[in-house]
Amino acid sequence: MNATLTLSLALLLPGIQSEQPPKPESKPSAAAKAPKVEPTPFPFRLRGGLQGTVDIQAVQVETRLIADRLRQELKIPVQATAVVAAHKVDLTLKGAPLSLLLSSLAPVVLADIEVSGDRTADIWKAIHLVGYNEKSPAKPIEQVGFLVAAGVTDDPSVTAEDLKAREDKEAAKGLEGEEQEREKPSLSVSAQDGRVSVRARKQFLAVLLNEVAARAAIAFEIRGNVDMVPVDIEIRDLPLVDLPVALGRAGVRVVIRKDLNTGEEVVHGIRLGDGLR
């Protein structure tokens, strides 16, 4: 009877039960930890650079991994937004244009390009992969300062028609007055809807391009040394992107952003100098 009572007290009284030593907490062994997941490899081959062809076979591969491979091959930034980067794609392409691969990775593909003359010599600076309704990436060139030059330029409201009317008026002055007028430095610039008209006499290239950029509401940047030979030129209703060809001077580049899916090109700025890369 006493033994039975003692056993019952041991079961009922927490003080008696707590005298037993606590069991040590079990820790997961190193073998129980989840193994590190390596990126899924996929066959990839690019031939011919930006204008070349690509072979790829990808099954549920994140877009960011393909963008990384393109960056390594093309030697330029290939940037994807967070939404696009995490998206997984299934792709099988063989001998396909690079543009087809890019359009398969994102609904909006933008390229930052510097145009210096012949369009076959375009310099690609970056590629952006963007989703629908996502914010556009930062502009490829930003205005960081202003170039102030001595002299007189036309009223900001001047148009291409105003320039033509001025030409007609000067033509009627006679040879003597026209010759005197030609001896004076002058600059007339009109820019609208991505096109530009220029009439320049004895103007430095930097001053001319700064005025074009100001009228077109785009950025202007100088890097390194610039051509200091005065410019005499007349341009009428020329697409801004063709300005380097019209000027025929080294070190002039127009910075554009091109939508590779639609072909639309927007001029964002002008660069000048021998320090361009």
Image (cartoon, grey):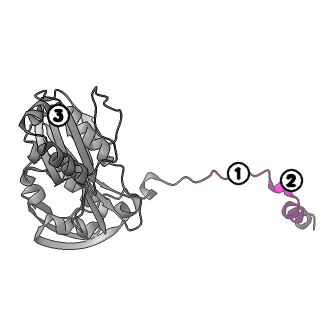
Q: What is the C-alpha distance between the residues marked 1 and 2?
A: 14 Å
Question: Which structural element holds mark 3?
Answer: helix
- 162 or 104, which lies in front? 162
In this rendering, which labeled residue sits more in front, label 3 or label 2?
3
Label located before the other in sequence (1 or 2)? 2
Q: What is the C-alpha distance between the residues marked 3 and 2?
A: 95 Å
Tag 3: amino acid: Leu
Q: Is residue 126 visible?
A: no
Label located before the other in sequence (3 or 2)? 2
Tag 2: amino acid: Gly
Q: Residue at (36%, 53%) from the top-left corner?
A: 137
Residue beneath disc 2: 15
In this rendering, which labeled residue sits more in front, label 1 or label 3?
3
Q: Residue at (26%, 36%) from the top-left corner?
A: 221
Labelled disc at residue 205: 3
Residue beneath disc 1: 22
